[in-house]
Amino acid sequence: MLLTTIVTATTPARAGDGSLDKDEIRKVVKTHIQEIRSCYNEGLSRKPTMAGKLTVDFEIAAGGEVSSSQIQQGSTLADAKVEGCVAAAVQSWKFPAPTGGSVHVSYPFEFAPG
């Protein structure tokens, strides 16, 4: 069974000592969006009408690696397996090295079957 999903990633919010252009962040997310979609598709195989939003909070360390990744409270997706999968996927990503230190990012995703 082929499952089609809509995963929308909007503009990230940033904070922290360092800086990294939001377009650079968006480019890396776009490169890995299939990983996020795969997490959601696994959830859809269990709950075919699952939909909602979640925001991933993560820190990009000085070398560009993600040093921490977690799902913000308030996720409307309400599926711990999908949320854990998304957080783990983001944890494995590599970004360009930020200028001036680490960068904290909050990145929202919206999921809907389609």
Image (cartoon, rainbow, N blue to C red):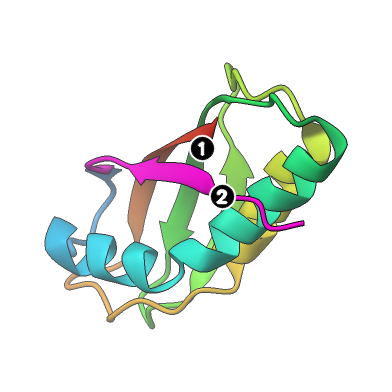
Could you say where residue 104 lies in the image, as x and y percent from the top left?
36, 50
Q: Position of 85 compared to 56: left or right?
A: right
Q: Which residue is mark 1?
A: 114
In depth, the one of 85 and 49 nearer the eye is 49
- The local secondary structure at tag 1 comes to loop
Query: Can residue 82 be spotted in the picture?
Result: yes
Total labels drawn: 2
Q: Position of residue 33 (x, y in %)?
A: 45, 62
Which of these two is toward me, 56 or 100?
A: 56
Quote the CA–CA distance across marks 2 and 1: 5 Å
Residue 97 horizontal/vertical position (percent) = 28, 80
The span picked out in magenta is 1-13
Number of other residues with Cα within 10 Å of mark 2, as a class: few under 14, some 14 to 19, many 20 or more? few
Residue 70: image location, x then y, percent: 62, 44
Q: Residue furthest front?
A: 1
Horizontal side of 75 relative to 81 (left or right) equals left
Q: Is residue 62 above or below residue 59?
A: below
Q: Amino acid at mark 2?
A: Thr
Is residue 21 visible in the rendered image? The answer is no
Instruction: Say which residue appears at 22% left-offset and 42% top-offset.
Output: 11
Q: Residue furthest right?
A: 46
Near-viewer residue (48 or 20): 48
Left or right side of 4 for 19: left
Provide the residue designation for mark 2.
4
Residue 21 appears in which quarter of the rendering? bottom left
Query: Quadrant where the N terminus lies?
Result: bottom right
